[in-house]
Amino acid sequence: MPRAREINIKIGRLPTGKYNAITDVKGVRVGHVSLIEGENIRTGVTAIIPHEGNIFQEKLIGAVHIINGFGKSLGLFQIQETGTIESPILLTSTLNVWKVADALIDYLSKSNPEVYSFNPIVAECSDAFLNDALRRYVDKEHVLRAIDIAKSGEVEEGNVGAGVGMRSFGFKSGIGTSSRIISTCDGDYIVGVLVLMNTGREGDLKINGEHVGLKLLNKDTETKKRSLEKGGSVIIVIATDAPFSSRQLTRIAKRATFGLARTGAIAHHFSGDIVIAFSTANRIPFKSEKIIMNVKELHESVITDFFEGVIEATEEAIINSILQSKTLAGKDGRVCKGIPVDKLIEIMDSI
Amino acid sequence: MPRAREINIKIGRLPTGKYNAITDVKGVRVGHVSLIEGENIRTGVTAIIPHEGNIFQEKLIGAVHIINGFGKSLGLFQIQETGTIESPILLTSTLNVWKVADALIDYLSKSNPEVYSFNPIVAECSDAFLNDALRRYVDKEHVLRAIDIAKSGEVEEGNVGAGVGMRSFGFKSGIGTSSRIISTCDGDYIVGVLVLMNTGREGDLKINGEHVGLKLLNKDTETKKRSLEKGGSVIIVIATDAPFSSRQLTRIAKRATFGLARTGAIAHHFSGDIVIAFSTANRIPFKSEKIIMNVKELHESVITDFFEGVIEATEEAIINSILQSKTLAGKDGRVCKGIPVDKLIEIMDSI
Amino acid sequence: MPRAREINIKIGRLPTGKYNAITDVKGVRVGHVSLIEGENIRTGVTAIIPHEGNIFQEKLIGAVHIINGFGKSLGLFQIQETGTIESPILLTSTLNVWKVADALIDYLSKSNPEVYSFNPIVAECSDAFLNDALRRYVDKEHVLRAIDIAKSGEVEEGNVGAGVGMRSFGFKSGIGTSSRIISTCDGDYIVGVLVLMNTGREGDLKINGEHVGLKLLNKDTETKKRSLEKGGSVIIVIATDAPFSSRQLTRIAKRATFGLARTGAIAHHFSGDIVIAFSTANRIPFKSEKIIMNVKELHESVITDFFEGVIEATEEAIINSILQSKTLAGKDGRVCKGIPVDKLIEIMDSI
Amino acid sequence: MPRAREINIKIGRLPTGKYNAITDVKGVRVGHVSLIEGENIRTGVTAIIPHEGNIFQEKLIGAVHIINGFGKSLGLFQIQETGTIESPILLTSTLNVWKVADALIDYLSKSNPEVYSFNPIVAECSDAFLNDALRRYVDKEHVLRAIDIAKSGEVEEGNVGAGVGMRSFGFKSGIGTSSRIISTCDGDYIVGVLVLMNTGREGDLKINGEHVGLKLLNKDTETKKRSLEKGGSVIIVIATDAPFSSRQLTRIAKRATFGLARTGAIAHHFSGDIVIAFSTANRIPFKSEKIIMNVKELHESVITDFFEGVIEATEEAIINSILQSKTLAGKDGRVCKGIPVDKLIEIMDSI
């Protein structure tokens, strides 16, 4: 399966980072543990490690934006209150979030003795279409392994990690990522986006503005009137090496909505669409001898370029999450088809 | 100048109301007073009257969503607290908002004696490109006239009322409107949207997904890197006859972002993008003998259809606001060109 | 240990309900499972059951207010988005929240087959002073038992359920409850409050306005300058049988802050102070044939009386949570002393 | 009329600044213009100048907290979005806010040519009990004069400026102020609070915890059941020289609620209770050659001391606003009595 740019789908005007991935932000690592067993297990867990150090002792400035608050993601309101993240960000399927958070406590407390309060961040989408979700197959060992194997460089996309059981717009989807370079008079910065994509009604998919959804499904508009898939949702994680305050990151996180909107998604009632953003530029120590900190912060006059970067990277990460996901069968003999790439190329070429 | 549908641009799948306008919601009226005088006066005021009665005595359930809070719009946080609107909604240019609100007090107090607290709602975009904005030309008489002449039926679009001095994506813009019929098992409802459109960078315009912006300007991507117009903003007013709570209307208002995003706008730093929504279905009396009210409310299971309706109507209202606005000259000999309709038709036909 | 009114401490002017407890709201039940074993286990779980039926199938209108968002409570943002609660409300200690939520899934899915999305509500305070918190002793069986044994009528207070390991203002604290009757021209309503109280610096306690904190500790003001206890927090649950919208319940929930403030608490940095409110007056069906609902709602003109009721009941519930908690020893030989009741009576009498 | 400390009412434990006023924060100035003419004019305007320079060119970091959003205050949501204030803060009576904001545009544009967007901050309480409020007596000249005469040092309190027509708890009230010194390992900081106080039901006043309200009125509890005064509200302005981010200032602003609560106020339905906070420690340039800023920020570990300072100073500022306000007659022969100071001293001594 190709990525968007490999089939000449070029979203936006800004250049991408080296890997066109969230890992273009230095220090950010991603690890997937995929659980695909027998007929009914189609789930997994994905870990995003924000920096190389002890994230609890050296917190990063972070922010949250809730596009649609139907969801069970954990750890969000403390990020809003304190403006920091103090845990890796774990992605998994809906009913696994609590088990994953509980496992994160073991991980966090191991390297932070004498601490009794941690704010594990775990976000989710439902994989109940392909996976026997009520069984909650993700265990502590999977969480620790995903963190342990997390790496920089290329990021595996599609049916991996938390992405194993996802679907969107009637197609198989999963993990996707993309990045943009933002040039300023002070040098270049990176914004990287990783999505766990699981929303969008059949037929609604747009790629780079083109209404390809119905054509790819060989359906006409009339069939478009139908109930949305239950248990949608998308999780959007934004990383940047540019120095921003939590307030500024919140503004940036809000722009992910614009990227999402351009793919045809509408954040339907049951779709829990959550954005988590962080910056690697400042580290906020848990404890500090010095109480006055010198925090670097970009002047608001350049923030619009980052808005644009996030919008482009979100749209492209979503398209990648679909392009990179192959057909997968699962629970009760259900099949979720991958997007027909050849047909897509044909359609895009004809425009 | 044509409306979108008159040149075969059909946005979305849902049917429009009779006038394809916010006035398709029964009882809603719109009035414009346009101030175009000499070289420097290019401004105006638009009044949206929510129902035929005394809006202070019989309030409507309302909601606000702030897409980007750079702006001076008035009356918003009381709508959020009380969940009601108690004033006509006036649109004008940035520096006129306070004068317009002050005039609204005269209007509201005249028919509500012994009341000393009113929450006038006035929203704004900047017309400082074409208009001598610091002079604040909108007077009390203009406000009262806009309210007085407000009417149902067709809504004038483009360079009228508050829309006189607007521009978007490098083209002249102004007032635009559209509506959608939402069919439910309980019958049909209407959502209507009216926009005061004044945002979007040159070249970024998309119409129904097509990247027409640069082509219409005969420019290439390289020229796209430039600072955004100052003083952007868009005001989006949503009316519906479907019974929703303030919480539900807030969810609906948030979906206007998706329609905005599809036009190429990104809510840049200086763009104050505000959504105000109201429902005509329940009237909340200022004073009531009975303290228990029976409020009608739609079950959340149908709200997604209204999300879709608002997204489509917002996108179409924005496109209408541009299509309907002719070239206009103003302050300091500046000219803002209308979108070249013939060329647009040519481009859209070639796709 | 006495309750406040048993030693003549009468907070506010409004009459209390029969049990002066959250269970004065018809249908509300409370169950505690207390874990006090050996030297190191001092923890537990408390279940609040909002009505007698299937809370997932017949949701209640609910709201959340975050006084200070340092905390790990679960399920909050979906309440804000949907305006409903669909789960019992469980209280426990900080690091047990995820295990408790996971157990709630078993409970909820058992009576709701074919459902793959639940929003378990679990709120927390830290008991790490007396309890070996990292071990997370609360298991699924404890959760199910707390739900199972929940009952109406008198509510046990103090060192029970989630309250076992709490302390506040330098004294042992735990669970407390209180209620108020609100008389309207339409008849009487009840607001009930239950708190899990675990915040407040040594010396800062005020009872009914009296600065008793330092006197009870035999300390003077100078000693007052010291770091706040780590891991504070208070959880405030409000129930009412009055019909209110989610927006109105949010306003009511915000007033709990006023009751908290009157006890001397200041919501210090590490104190996660969360308010959850619900009304038993309307039931919102998960699925509904009819899409138009007739929702009862009180006119805003009477809401101030409910503000007052919540303030009084919150203050009294907090005082009860302290008065009802006896001295308890725990982890590492630590002892948390109960408030000296005789001395308190003496001080209050002398005023 | 005495200030609280002059009659031995000492609120809290922290030391006050030199003037026990918001002007203890270096650079902050306050100016009042009081309009007391004939029988019906009892109104005014108060200006708070945040620093000595051009506040639009050198913005300060700011924040807003809305305790109860029934109100017409202007400029709030842009503070929340941008995290800065760019205007003096003007206080006036409800129906004058728009005229005052319009006048501020003249003031701001005069020293900032070529700027067409300003965010004037104007907050309000209603003086309709004593003042012929619908006539809106505050004119541009009063606004400019209040700004012009603003000074550092002692702040006049009581029936001055916007405070002329206020009443609270059944007594005359108006402007009040107080401050606290916060000692840290990095030296001393100041938090100053100024209130425009106009809320609280007859009989509910508490001073330093003592329920003096009914005693001062010679009334018993039975008379306490009555409707709240219409048009309440309190505006609380917080200044500090400590370096905080907008997010941190929001947390600090929220603590003003605790100070308000301790005076007996409950933020009744019609009471628009608004908090605006700013820090003088960092200046954010409107335009900047350098896009990377070095922002000073205090580590979150010391923020609790500032919470405490704001709570104490808010409570004391409110008490000062009542103690400093003499009996005043106004519209329609109405009289609002000042608090009986001798009787208050007697009561406080007897405790």
Image (cartoon, coloured by chain):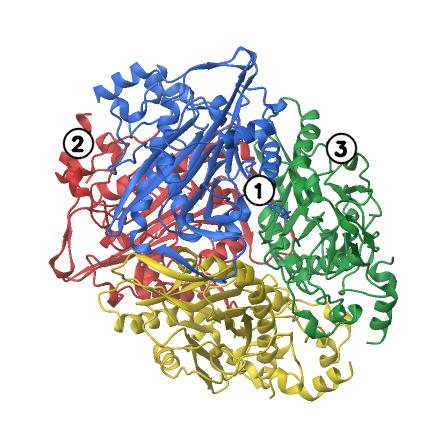
Chain colours: A red, B blue, C yellow, D green
Residue designated by label 3: D144
Instruction: Residue at 32%, 18% (x, y): give it.
Output: B215
Q: Residues within 10 Å of mark 1 (few under 14, many from 20)?
A: few
Instruction: Residue at 46%, 84% (x, y): give it.
Output: C153
Q: Residues within 10 Å of mark 3 (few under 14, many from 20)?
A: some
- SS state under label 3: helix
Expressed as whole percent of the image width and height from the top left, the position of residue C25 reads 46, 76
Expressed as whole percent of the image width and height from the top left, the position of residue A340 reads 15, 39
* Kind of residue at disc 3: Leu
Expressed as whole percent of the image width and height from the top left, the position of residue A118 reads 48, 63
> Does residue D204 lie above or below A272 as drawn?
below
Mark 3 to mark 2 CA distance (whole Å):
66 Å
Cβ atoms at labels 1 and 3 below 8 Å apart: no
Residue designated by label 2: A345
* Kind of residue at disc 2: Ile
Residue designated by label 1: B111
Q: Is residue A133 left or right of residue A299?
A: left
Cβ atoms at labels 3 and 2 below 8 Å apart: no
Instruction: Residue at 76%, 42% (x, y): give it.
Output: D44
Chain letter of the residue carrying label 3: D
Decide if residue B270 is in sight here.
no
Cβ atoms at labels 1 and 2 below 8 Å apart: no
For residue D255, which quarter of the picture? bottom right
